[in-house]
Structures are given as C-alpha cells and as structure tokens.
Amino acid sequence: MKRRWSFSFPSLLLVLSLLVAACSGTPANQAQGDAKPAENKPAEPAKTAASSTPADTLFVGITADQGTLDPAVTFDNGAWKITYPAYQRLVEYDGATTEVKPGLAKEWKVSDDGLNWTFTLAEGNKFADGTPVTAEAVKFTFDRTLKIKKGPADVYSVIKEVKVDSPTSVTFVLSKNFPPFLSTLAANYGGIVNPKVMEKEQNGDLGQNYLANNTMGSGPYQLTEWRKGEYIKLTVNPNSSVKPALQNIFFKIIPDATAQRLQLEQGEIDIAEGIPNEQLKALKDSPNIDVLQQPSLFVDYIYVNSSKGNEALKNPKVRQALSYAIDYDALTESVQEGYATQMRGPIPKGLWGYDESSFQYKRDVEKAKSLLAEAGVSNLTLDLLYSDNKAWWETEALALQAFFSDIGVKLNLKKIAYATSREMIDKGEFDLAMGVWSPDFGDPYMFMNYWFDSVNFGLAGNRAFYKNDKVDELVRKAASVNDKAEREKLYQEAQKIVIDEAPYLYLYQKDFLLPVSKSVKGFVYNPMLEGIYNLAEMSK
Amino acid sequence: MRQIIAKRLSMLVLVLLGVTLITFFLSHVIPGDPARMMVGQRASEETLQEVRRQLGLDQPVWVQYFTYMQGLLAGDFGNSIRTQQPVVDDLIKFFPATLELALTAFIIAIVIGIPIGILSAVKKDTGWDHTGRFFSIAGISTPVFWSGLIGILIFYKFFDLLPSSGRIDLTVTPPTTITGLYLFDSLVTGNWAAFGNSLWHLALPACTLAFAQLAIVTRQVRASMLEVLGQEYIRTALANGIHGPVLLFRYALRNALIPTITVVGLSFGSLLGGAVVTETIFSWPGMGKYVVESIAFLDFPAIMGFTFVISFGYVIINLLVDLTYYALDPQIKE
C-alpha cells in the first residue's frame, strides 16, 4: 500500500500544473500549455519578450494603496509620490541636494529680522485646468492648510499672515524668526492648490473630500485615473510649461514582494519599491536591473543619558569609551545586511551642514579601556532600553552587549512596550536607549536644535538630556540668523563639541535602496524626497 | 418554514450587534492612535487634540460606539480615516472583487471536488482513491502563499501564459458596472474583450484558492459517501436490483450531500473572509487587501465595516445552509 504514495516532487508539480492549466481561461494559451509538459521546464531561463512596456509609460510597483492625497492633510511619503509631481511649490529641492532652488517663485527676499519673506512669482505657470498661478492662489493654499488644522498646519504654525502684494508677489509674515522656513516650503505640504477646489467643497470641508482622490495643482503631471486597489495613473498636465518624456505613469499596487520581484524581472514593471533587502542582493546580479544605493537621512542612534541616568555617564570620557567600544562595520553588517553608512556626528551625510572632516569614532578597545580608567570607573553596569518598534533592534542590542563586554561594561537589555518606552524616554528613566530619527525638512536645525538644545529635554528631541552652554548658544544663534553660510559655520562648530562629548552613540544612516530597470534614465535620488520620483526629467 | 426564517433573521440582528460591539471595543483597546498616524511623529499636542476632536476620538468610547451605531442603522459606516472616503463606497468597490474570486474558486472546488470524492469512495483503496486522497492532502496542507507562488512561477515566469496580478489588464477598460463582478457584467453587456481578459486574470488566483478548498470538499464527500454506502438501505436497494448511477446519485449522493453542505457552506464563508493571502499574492483588489491596509493604519471605521460585511455574509450563508437542509432532509422539517 505504501509504495502507491511514493510520488516524486516533479510529478507533483506536473499534476499541479496540469490541474491549473485545465482551469485556465483563454483557449489559445491552453493549446500552448498542452504543448509544453511541465516536467522539463523549470530549468529553462525565463523569456521576457512578451512583456516589455511602452517607452513613454513608466510602471512603478508600490506595496499598498494610498490614503488621502490632499497636500494640506497627508503626512505620508506614500501619498507624496503621487502628489509631488502634480503640484509645484514656491521653491524646490535642487537635484540631489537638500538646498532649494526657485520653483513657482523666481526670487525671494527676507527682512533683516527674519519675519517677512517676500516671494516674486515667475510668469506662465498654470494649473491643469488652465487657470494661472497667482499670489492669490498661494495665499489661498496656506490659509486653507492652516484652517484645516491637520499635520501640515503644525509645520506652518509659525505663519502669522499671508499677504498678497500684487498678482505676482506674496509676503509671509512670521510670528518669529525661523530660518528653516524656506525648506518647509519645498516639502510636499508646500504644494500650491488651485483655489477652484472651493467649487468642490462639501459641508465646509474646504475641498478635503475632493482632494483626497484628485489633484488640482500646476505640476507637470495630474492624476487621471485611480482604480482603487489596482493602480494610480498620472498623465501629463497639458497646461504645464514642462514637456516631460514620460506621458503616462502607472503606480501599480503589488503587495507581495515576490510578485513584485518577478514582475520586475519580466520587465512588466520598471521600478519595484517593495522588495526587502535580503532579496536585493540576488537582484543585483540580474542583467536588466540596477539596484540604486544611497545613504538616506534616516538615522539609528543611541541616547546616552548624560544627566538623569547612571552617574558615570555624566563624565564625557565614559561616553567616549562607549563610542570607541563599537565595531561599526560589524554592526551595520549584522543588523542592516551592510546596507547602511556609519554616521559622522549628528548631521547625516547628504544634508547640508554635514562635515566630511569631522572626527569619526572607530573601534579601539584599548583606548576605551584607558578612558574608563582615566574616569575612575570600573565594573560599570548599564541598562539599555529598547522596544519592538524596529525589528532589527533586538539584534542590535545583542551586538552592543557583546561590544561593551569587551571593554568591561555589562549591558542589561531592557525590552519593553513601545508606548511605555516613549514615556520612560520622555522622563529620562534610562541609561542608554535606542532611537531613530529622520528630518521633516532639509535643514540641520532638525538635528542640531532638536537633539542638543537643552530646552528640548525628553521626547521633544534632546533625548540624551545633554546640556552644554556653549552648544546651546551656538545652535540658538544658528537658528536666529538667515545667512546660510554663517549658520553652517555655527552648526559645524557645535557639531565638533557634541562629537567629542558624545551624548549620543552615532551609529548609522540606513541606505535607500531601489531596484530599477536599466532602461529607466534620469532618476535623481534626493534624500529629502525619499520615495518621490523626478518624473518630468526621467525617460525610458 | 416561514417562522423558522423569521426566527433566524431576528437572531441575525443579535449576532451582528455582538459583532459590532466586540470589534468596536477591540479596535479601541489596541495600543496606537490613528490621530497620531495622521499628524506625524513630531506634531504639537494642540494639533493632535484638534485632529482627535475632528475624528471624534476625544469622546468616551461608549459615546463613540453609540454615535457609530446610530450611523450604522442609517446605513452609514462612517468615513475611513485613511482614505477620507465613506467606508460604504470603499466596500462597494472591493466586495465584488472578493465575491467574484471566492465564487469562482468555490464553483471550481465543487465541480472538481464532488466527482473526485465520489470516485474515491466508489473505487475505495484503488489507484483512483489514492490519487484523489493525495490531492486532498496536498491541497489542505499546502499554504496558499506557497501554492500561489508556485503557480505564478510556472504559469507567469516560465510559460508566460497567465498574468500574475490584477483583475484586468491596464489597457482593457473594465465592463460597465452592474454587479461589479467583471465576468457577469461583461457577459451581460456582451463585452467579450473584457470577459476574456478578466477570465484570464481570474484563472490563477481562483485555481489557487480552489486547490485548498478542493481538499475539504473531496474529503467530506468521500467520507460521507463511504458512510452512506455502508448503510442498510443501500444494501436493500442493491438487493432490489437498483445499481449503477441510479443507486449512486439518487439514493446515496443525496444523503451524503447533507453533511457536505454544512462543511462546504461554511468553507465558502471562510473563502470570503480568508482570501486575504490570495489577494495579497495576486494583487487582487478585494476586501482582504483593503482590510490589511486599514489594520496597518488603525483605520477602525474601515475595519468595522469589513467585519460587519463578512459577519453578515457568514450569517446569511449559515441560514442558507440550514434551509438547504430542510429541502434535502424531510426529517428535519418538524
């Protein structure tokens, strides 16, 4: 009886495939299926001729459908990839940098006290329906965002008033000096909305319902079709002054990573966003696919509690010793498959203000031990607080435990619920804690003022409870002047101190990885626009 | 009969009330805050409170529940937090896709499963039986994400015969919406291009889903057939010279189908709610995929809407199963 069960695996596959073939739809294909028995096939290489896509159409595989597309509401990068090319902003991020260049505004000036920003609009920009972009539209956009009072309103809470000086000139009156203001205008929520959206208003929603599913901007593209759960289609805005090479963009929703990978390999999609790191290694060898790799501005670091934790941590030498204990390359290899770049102080690579010449810690066990001896510390035991918020933190905690034991520091791992861990971090009830950070706008303010100004103790940003009067002075000054060169100098000076005093263990920036078909040309990765494509400059 | 239906329908109201109550409170005790998801990590407390107020999250949970139920009674499932659209609109878009997939898979499973089950029972312990049972075991023990991927590898990657994702090609216009079931709508409107294309897209996911269901049907039919065939009235019938197809279909199968209907009916319910994995693998724009995305966003109006529709479907299927019982088995009529 038993022997009847001894089916071999190939025959199972054969049976299985014949069954599915029997149910398949089109007769023409069935005939083809019958002609090719399954058993010898799997060894044969895939053919791709049948599924290459038209040259004026780009197919991007995304993992999930999008929520609302209203620039005044959405705080989600996923939605930004749709909206960013559909709207224009007063200023735009310049190429691959975090600096800004003219957008709708051809020039701007700021008053000496930093409270009045005046923008002069370039002529000839039109919304997709042909309406010209005027100063009124700019005022309307920001008034609307502030009235809707959702996430983006918070970013612009510094705006006291928007004044129309003339059809081509608009002035923002701020309630306080805020040098990063210019950078916030280049973000997605700075997209200028066609005031005609008010014709679509329902129950006083300022058109939120309509803009959740439609775009009304002056960007080179507009949303023309959204088949929920299937794809989102952008086509060229006929009234835009830009004439892009790509006429149609399909964002295809493909939740399964393997399915995405297969479609990319078959040439059915040109870009696949949902393929995990471990599968990318295999894709790198594929002849038709490039895997782009760039440092992102998403950093992973450790807060060293410099005033409320273990007494020993108040001594900078102990904090330096911890920084010297870590083998940074081994760490990124084990927790990020090597797809990460070691930090060099708080300001990450890719953001202006990054200092290539600044000091970078390397593993040096002897030096770490002697620093501990100089500090008069022995048998140090520290707690490391972390949660399940990031999947890799468990591995990272174990790696740190091993590194620290090499210099004679015992590390207790304390893993607790995310919500609780946030509360404990806010109150300073920890020795060391794991954290991640990414900037909302392209300005070192996001790192230097949040992380080091002593008014920001706790979750607000200074999670190391670090206080240094000189650093306070430098970063506050940098946040009060509008001259970029001077600000950069101030930030770099402050950065030298905080690298030396090591209130954080500066671990790594995660890499941004994207598998792209070799036929796609012209894509430029901007670290502030992660997941957003410069579609108008791309081609196939 | 009518009394029974009326009674069952009144029970239905209670069941659904319980379902809404449990889902609502469950979705409110899980940690996480949809308002926080909307405003971003570093938003001020003021903005957060404002958004919570706009969403009604600042009210006590029971007040929120009553507000929700008030809306529900008027046929309003509320607005999705993620898409800002009425949940009803979203469900109307996604339900037909799931129903089409589940129905097709169900029909394939029945049409193939019942004959295999009968064959296995009649030709017990022969090669036929073993092959049939092998299929059952394979189907029931193969996770859908695996058989689906194998299907994609074979029919999409190696042979390039069938598409791996979606309901219809991007270049083909879907049929005019009547029921939302593409096959049905295109058939009714005579849109043959759309019919062929959606059938072609349906083949792989439906067969994958059917493969798992097939096992349940086959095993159940085989088991009940064997039981029935061993009973005395069959022997009596045989002794009276009744044999062949008449014996099999008129005497045996009718009785063997009663337990089968329960199992198969309930499995259809789980097809509706449980096609999540299949929908994910094949990028099928159905409710399963929608609810997974909603859960990730803690979008509780959408989660509630989904649960409500699925429970409603389940209860109705249960009712239909019971009614079929009455039709098939005169003994239960009292």
Image (cartoon, rainbow, N blue to C red):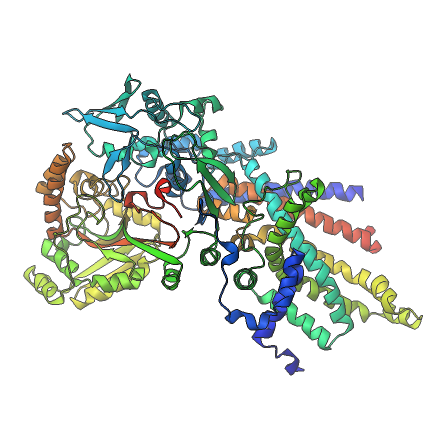
- Residue at 62% in and 42% down: B16
| Picture quadrant of residue A387 | bottom left
| Pick the front one: A388 or A473 | A473
Q: Nearer the viewer, residue B32 or A298?
A: A298
Q: Position of residue A529 (x, y in %)?
A: 32, 43
Q: Residue at image x 34%, y 42%?
A: A537
Q: Pick the residue in front: A502 or A534.
A: A534
* Nearer to us in this view, A250 or B147: A250
Q: Is residue B82 visible?
A: no
Where is residue A427, by image quadrant? top left
Which quadrant is home to the N terminus of chain A? bottom right
Left/right placement of residue A402 relative to residue A66 reads left
Name the quadrant containing residue B88: top right
Residue B17 placement, left or right of A467: right
Q: Where residue A135 appears, x then y in whole percent?
A: 31, 21
> In the shown orientation, is residue B223 left or right of residue A24?
right
Please determine whether, in this image, residue B257 is positioned above or below residue B189.
Answer: below
Q: How many marks?
A: 0
Residue farthest top in this picture: A166
State the image coordinates of residue A436 (x, y, percent, origin top left): 28, 50
